[in-house]
Image (cartoon, rainbow, N blue to C red):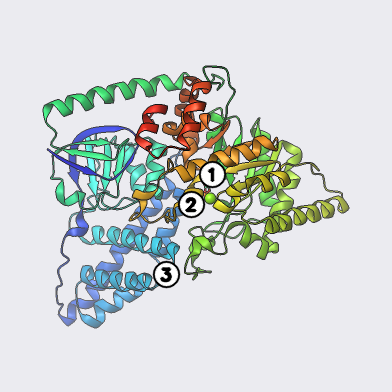
Amino acid sequence: MLLLNGTGIGDIAIGKALILDRRDGEISVRNLAEDDVEQEVSRFTAAVARARRRLESMRDELPESAPPELAAFLGAHVLMLEDPLLIDQTAGTIRRERINAEAALHRQEMRLKEVFDNINDDYLRTKKNDIGQVVERVQAELSTKSSQLLALDDDLADRIIVVNDLTPADTVHFRDKHMAGFITNLGGPISHTAILARGLRLPAVVGLHGASRMIQENDTVIIDGGSGTVVIAPDEGILAQYETRQHRARRHALGLESLRDVPSSSEDGVRVSLLANVELPEDIAAAVNAKADGVGLYRTEFMFMNREAPDEEEQYNAYSDAARRIAGPVTIRTLDLGADKQVDGGRADANSAVNPALGLRAVRLCLTNPGVFIPQLRAILRASVHGDVRIMIPMISSLNELEQVLELVREVKNALSRECIAFKPDVPIGGMIEVPAAAVAADLFARKLDFLSLGTNDLIQYTLAIDRVDDEVNYLYDPMHPAVLRLIRHTIEAGENNNIPVSMCGEMAGDPAYTRLLLGLGLREFSMDPATLLSVKREVLRTRVTPVTSAARESLFDSDTARLRSLLGGATLH
Ligand code: PEP
Ligand code: MG
């Protein structure tokens, strides 16, 4: 028996390992006779065309339930397969160096990755992974066997896939094959693949460096997504324990469906709002389906990615549609672009800042681009007549900046009035508390705003100085850190003292392990991926707020997080 530890997602899976780690294999170099060179180039371009067709058909056949970013993601990979830097240069290497396509492609991949390595930009570093994934597809097409990943047409029931890295598209592909779960060498808890696995409820452990070397084909493997533990070749006692836990978890998941129509109040009668996070207009259906109390975070920047920016009219239509379909509040966050979220995949406007997460992003970027910001504000204000629309400003850090935004909103309202265009004059304006400075001075922000929303993904990143996209430091990403908990409580208190609501829309709000703690800290509005809403609701229903309140407040002065966890209990995500 061998135990390994990585970053866990979801629940428990037990199965036989299926190792798919082609990338560790050596790529051999074959020298070509001059007469064979053009034939080799043709073999290469045919493999590229096949890889592109597979990607296109995967994109076209995405199920309706698939997260919408997937189509854009696949589209970006199709574009890479048309990029001369990858394709023409590889063909050039085949001709110039007279070597086989696999080796030429590998050399070009290394050259491109080296270029990306020398650019100090988080977003472009993620593009480096994309190059690896695209190249892997072409290499699979070049090999006489077709791609191991894509050729897995069998039912994968009870198989645990062990692979260097998985693309989000692969994750969806595997879901249809009924795989039990997966383990990857790479990736962090907020990587695309991890977020999708969570939405699809696939147990997984990511960022387990060396997994594909240490796990052997057909080993019995247990994935404990709750703790991130992988047990290889477990002894009988351990296996039996995990099987019992797995059955219990399945019964629990089935029971959750019956909670869909149950109002969310704690066992001692405290009403709690459970709202949905949405990324694209298509996600509104999931929010409606989950019977969310409203939308607590509409990440509008996703509408601007990999395409021409939507104009005021298109945005107005999207926001109005959400306002009409959602019975409760629709909290529209103004553009949070910058850092790892770039328009046009970051190609047109590569961010060369040394620390992009600390740079010109979110509201800072909007204030320097009124040509983008004003049409969005106009669209949101116009949509406000169709429902309970709210404006939310991301990443506020200074009062002066907030004043500038409020002044701009006043100007936009005046312009709409002059043009006789309808809007609700009292549309609530809130701010995201995701920079420690804003949390520490939350009372000052609370006086100027109608609501606050805790963005814990960034708040934890900035408070603990941990890059949220860097899996090397993810082990330090701790929502239970006393500094984080104090900032959360301080912000909620600022809301209470100023009679304005405080919600939370970071991942922490959608993790039932933290529900009791957050209720105890005074949180009453949770916004999350609709897929996690029922798990959190179940936790709310079985919590008595009064006793957890004293326990949670004590936690602010307690450095023993293990004691805190046992004190507050908490569920795992299903
Ligand atoms: C957050 O930072 O917690 C948040 C919700 O915003 P995003 O994840 O989009 O940065
Ligand atoms: Mg954020």
Res 247 quadrant in image: top left
Q: How far apart are the alpha carbons under marks 3 and 1? A: 31 Å
- Residue 463: numbered disc: 2
Res 386 quadrant in image: top right
- Across and down, in percent, residue 33 comes to 15, 80
Of the two numbered discs 3 and 2 on the same chain, state the one appearing first in sequence: 3
Residue depth check, mark 3 versus mark 1: number of the one nearer the observer:
1
As shown in the figure, which amino acid type bears the numbered disc 2? Answer: Thr
Q: Is residue 496 above or below residue 366?
A: above
Q: Nearer the viewer, residue 208 or 24?
A: 208
- Marks 1 and 2 in Cβ contact (< 8 Å): yes
- Residue 487: numbered disc: 1
Residue found at x 21% / y 37%: 159
Asked whether residue 569 is in view, the answer is no
Q: Nearer the viewer, residue 141 or 390?
A: 390
Find numbered disc 3 in the image and state the secondary structure of the residue it sits on.
loop
Q: How far apart are the alpha carbons under marks 1 and 2? A: 9 Å
Of the two numbered discs 1 and 2 on the same chain, state the one appearing first in sequence: 2
- Residue 120: numbered disc: 3
Q: Residues within 10 Å of mark 3 (few under 14, many from 20)?
A: some
